[in-house]
Amino acid sequence: MNSAQTTDAFVKLTTASGLVEADTWKAVLEANGIPVHLRHEAMAAVIPEIAGELAAVDLWVPREQAAQAMEILQDERVEPADEDELS
């Protein structure tokens, strides 16, 4: 995903605390037909023991599916990165 795609077509939905959480949320969303791009997953994959901001993985979804994606993840008690980004 290049920066033009990120700005135009995708929005940051939320940030997972690690790769396991990000992969779980990605699987749930993709099972519901929502494509997901992960960003910053490389550090979490290389050093799985890291914690905090270094382990954080951003989930990006198509802008037009962001509201639906948040509804799907509500059971996980996920908060959007920024409500304004989803508009």
Image: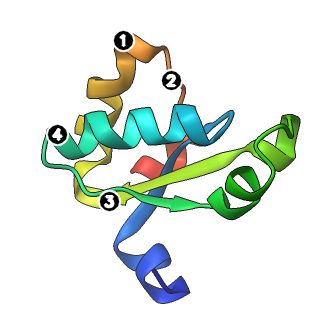
Please, what secondary structure does the residue beneath circle 1 have? helix
Q: Residue at x 30, y 61 (%)?
A: 62
Q: Residue at x 34, y 73 (%)?
A: 9
Q: Name the side, left or right, on which 12 lies relative to 52.
A: left
The amino acid sitting under disc 2 is Val
Tell me the residue that label 2 is attached to: 78
The answer to whether the residues at label 1 and label 2 have Cβ atoms under 8 Å apart is no
User: Which dot, 3 or 1, sits closer to the camera?
Assistant: 1
Using a 10 Å C-alpha cutoff, classify the residue at mark 1 as few (fewer than 14 neighbours), some (14 to 19) or many (20 or more): few
Using a 10 Å C-alpha cutoff, classify the residue at mark 2 as few (fewer than 14 neighbours), some (14 to 19) or many (20 or more): some
Please tell me the numbered disc located at residue 63: 3
The answer to whether the residues at label 2 and label 4 have Cβ atoms under 8 Å apart is no
Using a 10 Å C-alpha cutoff, classify the residue at mark 3 as few (fewer than 14 neighbours), some (14 to 19) or many (20 or more): some
Q: Does 61 sit above or below residue 80?
A: below
Whichever of callouts 4 and 1 sits on the residue coming sooner in the sequence is: 4
Tell me the residue that label 4 is attached to: 31
The amino acid sitting under disc 1 is Asp
CA distance for labels 1 and 2: 8 Å
The amino acid sitting under disc 3 is Arg
Q: Residue at x 67, y 61 (%)?
A: 40
Please, what secondary structure does the residue beneath circle 3 have? helix
CA distance for labels 4 and 3: 18 Å
Whichever of callouts 3 and 1 sits on the residue coming sooner in the sequence is: 3
Q: 48 or 64, which is in the foreground?
A: 48
